[in-house]
Amino acid sequence: MAEITAPRGVRDVLPDESWKWAYVLGQFRGLAESFGFSEVHLPIFEHTELFSRGIGDTTDVVEKEMYTFEDQAGRSLTLRPEATASMVRSYLEHHMASGPQPVKLWCAGPMFRYEKPQKGRYRQFWQLDVEVLGSVNPLVDVEIIGLSLELYRRLGMTNLEVVVNSVGCPVCRPAYREALQSYLRPHLGELCGSCRSRFDRNPLRILDCKKETCKAITEGAPDVMDSLCDECSGHFAAVRRGLDLLGARTHIDKRLVRGLDYYTKTAYEVLSGDLGAQNAVCGGGRYDNLAESIGGPHVPGVGFASGIERIVLTMEQQGCSFGRAPSLDAFVVCVDEAIRDEAVKLLYALRREGLGADMDYQGRSVKTQFKTASQAAFACILGGDEAARGVVAVKEMATGNQEELLFDDAASSIRSRLSR
RNA sequence: GUGAGCGUAGCUCAACUGGUCAGAGCACUGGAUUGUGGUUCCAGGGGUUGGGGGUUCAAGUCCCCUCGCUCACCCCA
């Protein structure tokens, strides 16, 4: 029988990596809380229509990337491909609009998209997610972008590019869409296949095409900025002013058109120069019509999502620090199986002091036990000799200094030496 | 979904044009040091060379199929 392995596109995050995740998550948590955001835990699956209506059924995500299944009662459910739609659903479902606005929430967890895996792209991936709901103030957009940039600054990430754009709103986008279509219509035959199919359904995405021929054609396309309505252009100007206030180095990319339909006005991405082809470390923007498209009242919102895998990849590439690697305070070396009971007592005495402590359970040689103890600050050596005299030999591994302590005092004495 | 590259011990990799080719280093365990680590030395366990079929006297090495991994396109975190 073939060995059972993890399904395609998913992976185990093992101890040599998981502590780095914990560090990133911890930094994010602290930062989000300090910006006034509160954590929510959201379900990992939702009714399929939340995503098909919220994200837009002509998007790649909805068309071909969703993990959709039927539950035993025949309901169509989908593993969430992103968190924003769930956030808005939760906001509506729990009537958060009736409290003070805006509502600032964060969450972190796995997302699922059925894509072909490659560097920095998995079928299950973790996102750090932040959303501000219930405010149209452009300073809120700035807060979102500012939070992401501050996170990357704290994590020590460099070589990042921040691109910002405005994708308009229902007032001005139809006109732009039409202007774009009439500009592109004569060139329709020259566009690539996928752009031709986008022409009717989602012409803005053609601006985003990476193919040289398509890029050349869209070079002379009408500028989004020229067609923004007064409100959108005013909003965009205010966002840029706010970003200047923060001293954020960003630049406008008129071709930035994000793949999810719900974006209005502000769209932005943070790109890492140290990833592979999947170089977006963060993406987000404003989605003032999402709530309505899933059947709710008008609720403006802005947010971002950032991928942990890509953050960690970038940080590793750049040699960033992940804080202190986890290590033990003490390792109990049991020299003689006959006094195993004493060793266990010592182990738990150390643990009751709040110290990180462990011991060997395999009856391994003393030499090998010391090898493991090298990773701890102290080795607590217990043999028949020590046990008989009610003492324990404590060796500081970094210096090699060793002394005897009374068995009953050892734990607290080690704790005070570690100044905890 | 499309394309390219790759699949030999837990890990990183050897094995000339098919002919003792199933190996090394690291890791793990034991020993040298009958109770002391990060340096040495010795020894040991662990692989039906991803799987299946074919060509051949003979295949890890050639052909076909299949599975898997990786990178890229698409799109995005």
Image (cartoon, coloured by chain):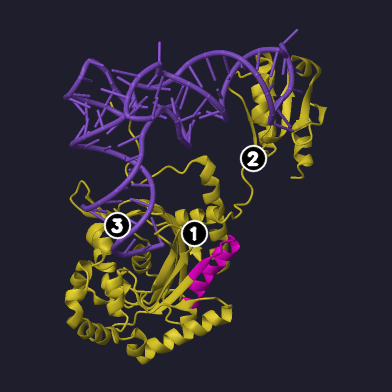
Chain colours: A yellow, B purple
Q: What is the magenta range?
A: A141-161
The location of residue A406, given as percent across then percent down, is 81, 26
Residue placed most toward the observer, A250 or A53: A250
**Quarter of the image containing the C terminus of chain A?**
top right
Q: Residue at x 68, y 35 (%)?
A: A376
Q: Nearer the viewer, mark 3 or mark 1?
A: 1
Quarter-of-image position of residue A46: bottom left
Q: Is residue A40 above or below residue A134?
A: above
Residue placed most toward the observer, A413 or A286: A286
Q: Identify the chain of the residue marked 1, using the numbered disc in the image.
A: A
Instruction: Name the residue carrying label 1.
Output: A274
The location of residue A373, given as percent across then percent down, is 67, 30
Instruction: Name the residue carrying label 2.
Output: A327
Instruction: Name the residue carrying label 3.
Output: A46
**Disc 2 to disc 3: CB gap under 8 Å:** no
Q: Residue at x 18, y 70 (%)?
A: A197
Secondary structure of the residue carrying tag 1 is loop
Q: Residue at x 55, y 76 (%)?
A: A248
Q: Amino acid at mark 1?
A: Asp
Q: Residue at x 68, y 38 (%)?
A: A355
Q: Earlier in the sequence, mark 2 or mark 3?
A: 3
Q: Is residue A59 above or below residue A143?
A: above
Q: Identify the chain of the residue marked 2, using the numbered disc in the image.
A: A
Q: Earlier in the sequence, mark 3 or mark 1?
A: 3
Q: Is any atom of residue A296 visible in this view?
A: no
The location of residue A95, given as percent across then percent down, is 37, 70
Question: Would you say residue A48 sits in the magenta stretch?
Answer: no
Q: Please state if A168 lies on the left or on the right of A32 as rendered.
A: left
